[in-house]
Image: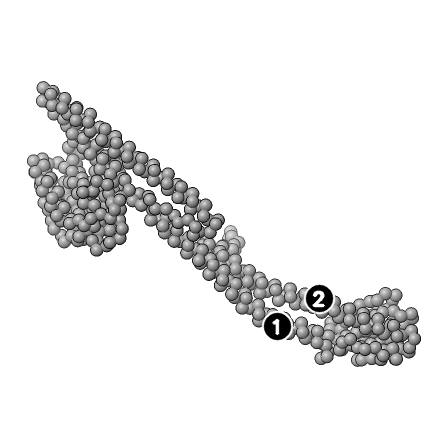
Amino acid sequence: MSKGWRLRLPRSLFGQVALLYGATALAAAILLPFGTAMLLHQIAGQYQRVMLERQADAVAMLLPGDRPHRAVRAVDLLAGGLTLAVVDRSRHVLAERGPARPELVTGIALDSRTRHVRRGALAAVSRPVGSRWVVVSQDAAAPEVVTDDIVRTFLSRFVWLLLPVTLIVPLVGAWMARRLTRRMSAVSTIAADIGPRTLDRRLPQGTLPAEVEPLAIATNAALDRLEQSFVTQAAFAADVAHELRTPLSVIRLRADGVTDPAVRNALLAEVDRAAHVIAQLLALADLERPPEDAGTPVDLLALAEQVVADRAPIVIDAGYRIALEDRGPTPVRGYAHAIQLAVENLIENVLRHTPPGTGITVAVGPGAQVRVTDDGPPIDPATLAQMTRRFWRGSATRSGGSGLGLSIVARVAAAHDGALHLSTGANGHGLCATLTLERADIGDTRERPRWPNDG
């Protein structure tokens, strides 16, 4: 069963206001001429009725002392198109002045009260005077009658005056609505740019309509609370990580004193793992804080060479291979400390989740990206989407990780308006992690935030 047709209003405020003004103007264009015409005709009819009564009274005053012929000819005519007649009870015309209208005399009521009748353009009044009646009529269509001509002329000119008004009103309404929606769109753009790195921004006040201003005030208050919670949470994580460093150092010193090598090595391994988790938490806490400046120029190739040189001894001692490829990187503006941490985490991820003998390739470029690939065992594509979640840990073949490495890399990418993309390596083996820094044109001098502790 088909549904009935329904009028759907536009969803946009501009469309609704424009539709409202357009409908109002259309209704005014239709109703105002019609209403004005009714009012003018009513006034003209009332004026005509009063004039006919006065003309009949003038004849009636002369009729008792004069003959009917002398009475109808002695009065002054108050308007054009009039016919004055005196009739008896049998409707015989005793005297008449003006065009003969026998059909009107035949049909008008003759009784003890003054009567009015209208038939098309003809209007008449009958007034009793003894055994006779004075009948005064007027044909509005007669050339000498100007009242109806004035009404028609006024209406025609009024319509021409009304048409521009009905066109201007919707245009003015649409212009006002467009100004309002543009101001709201500008505020919406500011709101859309507010994020973890721009928590200090607020919606402008005093530019929105009074009805919408409370929403901006409430939003700014919510952002104040969010910023405070954000800072408190990041500071808490950093404080906890710092506080744990001292106990871990004490535990490590005491573990060194254990005489049983197997127990000592197990304890040291757990202490190292806990220290690694704390270091990652500190790095994550730094990344979660709102940045403070625009960053500095970063040479991605030089940074990658430094990371590979620093990590190569550990990688080779663990039975892995590592290589660096230059694929034409572009200079970037960003946070060198954060990018270095991201590349180190990508290499560490390979060491923790692939068996010895795996080859690691760090490719820089093309453009503003760093790619770390390995030729380890195949990875189930279903797990790729979960690997950047915090504290998600796969089945590592070596010592367990903290589950923070790839989430930190993703956060570094987001800090540079980029992304971390994970895919399977060449021929379906290993993992290909691509760190893209899309905000990375060194010629771009836009103001950007600064990460705390950035070297």
Looking at the rendered structure, the secondary structure element under dot 2 is helix
For the residue marked with disc 2, what is the amino acid?
Answer: Gln
Residue ID at (45%, 48%):
213
Residue 407 sits in quarter: top left
Q: Which mark is residue 301?
A: none
Tell which of 23 and 199 is nearer to you.
199
Identify the residue position indicated by label 1 in the image: 156
Residue 429 position within the rendered picture, expressed as x and y whole percent measured from the top left: 16, 43
Q: Is residue 292 left or right of residue 58?
A: left
Q: Position of residue 209 (x, y in %)?
A: 46, 51
Give the distance between the C-alpha atoms of the residues marked 2 and 1, in whole angstroms.
17 Å
Instruction: Give the quadrant of the C terminus.
Output: top left
Q: Estimate the x, y position of residue 317 in percent, counting from the top left.
A: 7, 35
Q: Is residue 445 left or right of residue 266?
A: right
User: How many neighbours does mark 1 have within 10 angstroms: few (below 14), some (14-19), or many (20 or more)?
Assistant: few
Amino acid type at circle 1 is: Ser
- Residue 123 lies, in percent from the top left, at 77, 71
Quarter of the image for residue 316 reads: top left
- Res 42 label: 2
Query: Which residue ends up furthest to the front in the rendered image?
Result: 206
Q: Is residue 104 above or below residue 225?
A: below
Whichever of callouts 2 and 1 sits on the residue coming sooner in the sequence is 2
Q: Secondary structure at mark 1?
A: helix
Residue that appears at 62% across and 67% down: 33
Q: Nearer the viewer, residue 6 or 128?
A: 128
Depicted 423 relative to depicted 271: above or below: below
